[in-house]
Image (cartoon, grey):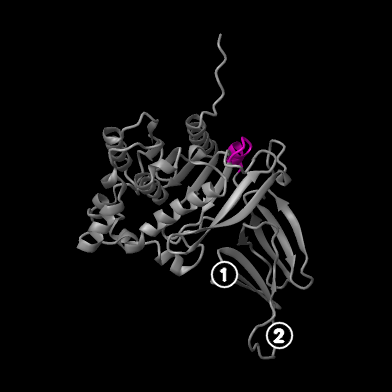
Amino acid sequence: MNLLEVQLFDNHIAVYERENGLPKVTLYRLPAIGESIGQLQGGRTIDFIDPTYAVDPEESEFHSSVLRFNYSSMRTPPSVYDYDMDSGVSVLKKIKPVLGGFDASNYVTERKWAAAADGTQIPMSVLYRKDLVKLDGSDPMLLYGYGSYKICIDPTFRGSRLSLVDRGFIYVIAHIRGGGEMGRKWYEDGKLLKKKNTFTDFIDCAEHLIKNKYCSKEKLCINGRSAGGLLMGAVLNMRPDLFKAAVAGVPFVDVVTTMLDPTIPLTTAEWEEWGDPRKEEYYYYMKSYSPVDNVAAQEYPNILVTSGLNDPRVMYSEPAKYVAKLRDLKTDGNLLLFKCELGAGHFSKSGRFEKLQEDAFTYAFILKALGMTPKMASL
């Protein structure tokens, strides 16, 4: 159990927690003024409609019995609910409109678990369109991962993602160690000298999905940004045979070189996450997984690497160096593209439409790698 937030009302307390990786909201009724509060028991838990979802508190009135929160899932657009803490009734007040004839009932969300090599169960959030997938191993898939800084990758709604799902893709988020979904220990088991758990968890999730016929090696694409880009580089070196295509956005791939340079503004603060390579134990451990230091003369899948010229967190030279080494050593004829956004930093170009253009470019690369782009009509 991981406590996130508490909201106090004149007659109730609302407790936001994360239990078993999922948000949980429990309401407790307070005793009358002058009575001992004692130990709160018998709280009422709000039930949510999807097996995997995200919940965020909204501003609520203190002198009220109504709790307001924001709910979404990979198939449910952001929705504002008012929950009556006396009656237990939820009322939908607002839902973000989605253009293009979107119907949430066409989509399925699931929560699946993959067993890691050490027996740890890794949760995954799954989205697909029920009238398009076969679940016989022939469906294309995009598997996303991050797994660093105790950041929770919640299964929220994203409209641009439907562009792939409506083409028959299965979209999966692997909630691997190093993130914060399952609590503090989950994070501690994916950092410093346990960082490789993040990479092996992701590989184990991919193998579980293949084994259970959600996809095949020939249809499995992967995606990650920043520290998730490090994840992409690491697993591509470890298991290049497992994936058809990979997208590494602003990837932190030259780990040892960057962490050895304290003049870079963020380096010393990052030692808490990755370790200080001036110490021998950390140096050799980091070198054993740093993507740039482990590129080998082997076949790699189709790869797209992106960077931002003005990125203060991951300098564009890191992914450029990584791509240059891949070009020098890899033995296949698959796509290897490097795209540097001249007007962007770490978080892509600003503006809603610019972000959609980036998504479109990424998805176009994935479709190209899978041979799913439409053929041009001959003149």
Relative height, residue 3 to residue 237 (above, below): below
Where's the N terminus, which quadrant? bottom right
Dot placed on the residue nearer the N-terminal end, 2 or 1: 1
Q: Residue furthest top?
A: 379
Q: Is residue 264 visible?
A: no
Is 212 a magenta residue? no
Q: Nearer the viewer, residue 207 or 173?
A: 207
Q: Is residue 158 left or right of residue 277?
A: right
The residue range painted magenta reads 159-169
Q: Residue tagged by mark 1? A: 5
Secondary structure mainly formed by the magenta segment: helix
- On the image, which quarter does residue 55 sit in? bottom right
In the shown orientation, is residue 355 left or right of residue 264? right
As drawn, 314 above or below 147: above
Along the line of sight, which residue is nearer the eye, 314 or 191? 191
Q: x, y (%) of residue 346? A: 40, 45
List the residue tagged with mark 2.
31
Q: Can residue 370 be seen?
A: yes
Q: Quadrant of residue 67?
A: bottom right
- Cβ atoms at labels 2 and 1 below 8 Å apart: no
Task: Say what amino acid the circle numbered 1 marks.
Answer: Glu
Under circle 1, the secondary element is: strand
Q: Is residue 188 left or right of residue 4?
A: left
- At a point 69% along the width and 81% down the height, the residue shown is 30
Q: Position of residue 250 (x, y in %)?
A: 39, 43
Quarter of the image with the C terminus is: top right
* Percent coordinates x, y for residue 258 in the rendering: 26, 51
